[in-house]
Image (cartoon, rainbow, N blue to C red):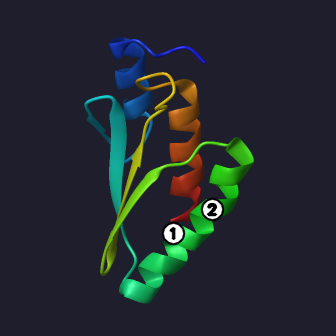
């Protein structure tokens, strides 16, 4: 899968709400309400990530889940990262 150019990344970010570029990745924090809600949100991410074979980095801090996505095998951002971000947004 081909890496996206900076212009393509900016265009795709503009179409997503709340996602920000962090170097070679995109990230967004989601509120789960409490720890249990955060864990349930993470559990909901398993199916779309497994279906795509594309797995985000996750950090849970009580009521907040921070999702970071990058295509590690390509060393940066690809179309798959933005597709997964859209699927995650649909779960939130």
Give the residue at the far front of this rendering: 73
User: At which x and y percent is residue 71?
Assistant: 49, 31
Seen at 32% across and 79% down, the residue is: 63
Residue 83 can be seen in this image: yes
Q: How many marks?
A: 2
Q: Which mark, residue 17? A: none
Mark 1 surroundings within 10 Å by alpha-carbon count, few (fewer than 14), some (14 through 19), many (20 or more): some
Left or right of 31, for residue 83:
right
Residue beneath disc 2: 46
Left or right of 41, for residue 63:
left
User: At which x and y percent is residue 40?
Assistant: 53, 79
Seen at 34% across and 52% down, the residue is: 28
- Work out whether residue 7 or residue 67 is closer to the camera in this orientation and state it: 67
Quadrant of the rendering where the N terminus is positioned: top right
Q: Secondary structure at mark 2?
A: helix
In the picture shown, does residue 39 fall above or below 91?
below
Seen at 58% across and 38% down, the residue is: 83
Left or right of 25, for residue 79:
right
User: At which x and y percent is residue 3?
Assistant: 48, 16
In the picture shown, does residue 21 fall above or below 67?
above
Q: Secondary structure at mark 1?
A: helix
Left or right of 14, for residue 42:
right
Question: Distance of mark 1 from mark 2, alpha carbons?
Answer: 7 Å
User: At which x and y percent is residue 74?
Assistant: 49, 22
Residue 18 can be seen in this image: no
Mark 2 surroundings within 10 Å by alpha-carbon count, few (fewer than 14), some (14 through 19), many (20 or more): some
Residue beneath disc 1: 42
In the picture shown, does residue 8 fall above or below 91?
above
Asked whether the beta carbons under mark 1 and mark 2 sit within 8 Å of each other, the answer is yes
Q: Quadrant of residue 48?
A: bottom right
Seen at 38% across and 32% down, the residue is: 13
Give the residue at the far right of this rendering: 51
């Amino acid at each position: 899968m081909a890496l996206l150019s900076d212009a393509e990344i900016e265009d795709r970010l503009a179409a997503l709400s709340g996602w920000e570029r962090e170097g070679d990745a995109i990230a967004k924090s989601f509120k789960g309400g409490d720890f249990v809600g955060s864990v349930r949100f993470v559990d909901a991410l398993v199916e779309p990530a497994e279906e795509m074979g594309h797995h985000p980095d996750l950090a849970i801090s009580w009521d907040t889940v921070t999702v970071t996505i990058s295509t590690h095998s390509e060393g940066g951002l690809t179309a798959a990262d933005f597709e997964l971000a859209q699927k995650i947004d649909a779960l939130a």
